[in-house]
């Protein structure tokens, strides 16, 4: 019970912070969803860094290190590349959003292409992509709390309690609650992750270097990329796809609107790649678990970090680790719920009811939070995929928004709203078809060389997207208006 009490204390602290965050503020739609556009470098850093340190960190990253070995390092690579892209991308996005007082990602596309219908399409794609990501957070929360409490709380009960708490402070405080909870979460997780990554290899193998030597001796080639399957071609294409999609998540995209000025993003782009290196310690803990608790198969590999923690430490410290894991679900989960609700209210409902006031839209957004939470719970209780697979599926979906964004930022509009919509639909349809049928590039094009067959199938969807976008834009682009021909006798 000691561990469970510690976890409960962290949950209460997070809820208290989240509720207190609204004090002294009128929670209109702008304040609730983008913090009144007044967040400085620290809060924006924590909100964007929250994208790294989620339940995926505790379970997916360590689980893939445990079960896959070398291919897991794609997780370390893609966010660093995304931060490089952010140095140029996010200031441009922020300026446009600030000028037009946008509150959602869908607003950006609707205004850029002068098409509310395109905004509604982007909102629906974003919400569909965020469902597996939210399921990832809730699934992870249930696993973490149940395991860290030594089974005193079942995963389903843990998920329900966490979701109710999450829904409460999101509805009341919006993005302010997410930001203040992120302060507690990042301070705790940094200490826990670094400690586990150093202590566990030392305890079970005599050090990080010795641990890798023993793993390589026991399983030759495990720490490298295989020649087929999760090969260097898969690694490269997955890193590229994930980097392009990193800021396409609606909750991350709209979180950038909360910044006080565009310089915030350039300062963050300098330090976020260094912050990403903390993930190395998660990998070290996962590899140490391979030595300490061997034999976990399939989705059970996601439990590796928690299993080795329970085996190695007293209950109070297991509770601290469980509390840190709980917070890694609450922060991104709160952003996902809030953003999904905002997109549906602002860009789907408002399309059907254009006369609705901002107050009505704001009330609807808050009312949708518990509805979306209930839908996510339903999927969580009926899910069966591993943590990483859930994340990869979501990334393949949101990345389909990138071509339209990239072409939309050009000074001279190269694509039309019809082309942007066609590309998104084609890309999402390709992702849906291949995901539901468990199809790979090798299945689609078996005659191609092995390196091509190893590509992430999301790249194929991105190519289909771009071709459709350009083709439809070429057909629907308005013809240039010809200059009038001077009549005889008129001045030329």
Image (cartoon, rainbow, N blue to C red):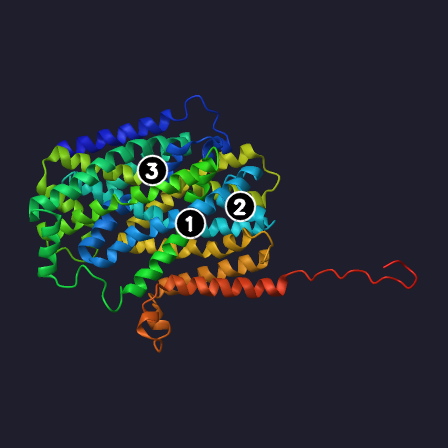
Label 2–label 1 contact, CB within 8 A: no
What secondary structure is marked by label 2? helix
Q: Residue 144: in sight, yes or no?
A: yes
> Mark 3 = which residue?
331
Q: Nearer the viewer, residue 403 or 35?
A: 403
Q: For this view, does 25 lie left or right of residue 318?
A: right
What distance separates the C-alpha of mark 3 from that of mark 1? Answer: 24 Å
CA separation, marks 2 and 3? 24 Å
In this orientation, does residue 385 appear? no
> Between tags 2 and 3, which lies in front?
2
* Mark closest to the chain's N terminus, 3 or 1: 1
* Residue that appears at 57% across and 39% down: 100
Residue marked by disc 1: 85
**Position above or below: 129 against 370:** below
Q: Quadrant of residue 182?
A: top left
188 versus 343 height, above or below: above
Determine which residue is flagged by label 2: 108
Image coords of residue 401 (percent x, y): 47, 54
Q: Position of residue 302 (x, y in %)?
A: 21, 51
Q: Which residue occupies the extreme front position in the image?
A: 492
- Mark 2 residue crowding within 10 angstroms, few (<14) / some (14–19) / many (20+): many
Residue depicted at 39% across the width and 48% down the height: 84
């Amino acid at each position: 019970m000691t561990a469970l009490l510690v976890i409960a204390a962290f949950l209460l602290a997070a809820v208290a912070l989240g509720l207190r965050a609204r004090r002294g503020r009128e929670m209109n739609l702008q304040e609730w969803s983008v913090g009144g556009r007044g967040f400085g470098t620290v809060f924006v850093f924590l909100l964007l860094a929250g994208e790294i340190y989620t339940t995926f960190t505790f379970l997916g990253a360590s689980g893939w290190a445990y079960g896959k070995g070398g291919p897991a390092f794609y997780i370390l690579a893609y966010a660093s590349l995304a931060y490089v892209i952010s140095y140029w991308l996010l200031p441009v996005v922020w300026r446009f959003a600030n000028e037009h007082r946008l509150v959602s990602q869908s607003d950006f596309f609707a205004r850029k292409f002068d098409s509310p219908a395109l905004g509604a399409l982007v909102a629906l794609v974003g919400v569909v992509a965020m469902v597996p990501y939210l399921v990832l957070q809730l699934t992870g929360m249930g696993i973490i709390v149940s395991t860290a409490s030594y089974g005193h709380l079942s995963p389903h009960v843990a998920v329900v309690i966490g979701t109710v708490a999450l829904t409460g402070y999101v509805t009341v405080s919006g993005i302010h609650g997410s930001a203040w909870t992120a302060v507690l979460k990042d301070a705790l997780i940094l200490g826990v992750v670094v400690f586990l990554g150093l202590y566990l290899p030392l305890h079970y193998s005599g050090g990080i270097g010795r641990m890798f030597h023993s793993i390589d001796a026991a399983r030759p080639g495990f720490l490298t990329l295989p020649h087929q399957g999760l090969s260097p071609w898969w690694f490269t294409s997955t890193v590229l796809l994930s980097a392009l999609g990193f800021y396409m998540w609606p909750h991350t995209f709209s979180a950038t609107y909360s910044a006080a000025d565009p310089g915030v993003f350039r300062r963050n782009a300098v330090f976020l790649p260094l912050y990403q290196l903390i993930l190395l310690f998660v990998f070290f803990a996962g590899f140490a678990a391979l030595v300490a608790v061997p034999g976990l198969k399939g989705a059970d590999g996601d439990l590796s970090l928690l299993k080795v923690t329970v085996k190695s430490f007293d209950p109070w410290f297991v509770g601290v680790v469980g509390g840190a894991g709980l917070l890694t679900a609450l922060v991104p989960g709160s952003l996902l719920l809030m953003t999904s609700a905002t997109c549906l209210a602002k860009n789907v409902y408002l399309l059907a009811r254009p006369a609705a006031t901002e107050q009505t839209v704001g009330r609807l957004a808050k009312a949708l939070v518990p509805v979306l939470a209930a839908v996510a719970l339903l999927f969580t209780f009926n899910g069966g995929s591993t943590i990483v697979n859930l994340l990869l599926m979501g990334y393949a979906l949101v990345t389909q928004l990138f071509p339209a964004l990239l072409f939309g930022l050009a000074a001279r509009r190269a694509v039309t709203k019809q082309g942007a919509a066609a590309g998104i639909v084609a890309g999402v349809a390709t992702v849906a078809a291949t995901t539901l049928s468990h199809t790979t590039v090798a299945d689609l094009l078996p005659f191609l060389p092995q390196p091509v067959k190893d590509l992430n199938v999301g790249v194929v969807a991105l190519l289909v997207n771009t071709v459709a976008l350009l083709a439809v834009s070429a057909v629907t682009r308005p013809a240039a208006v010809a200059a009038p021909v001077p009549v005889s006798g008129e001045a030329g």
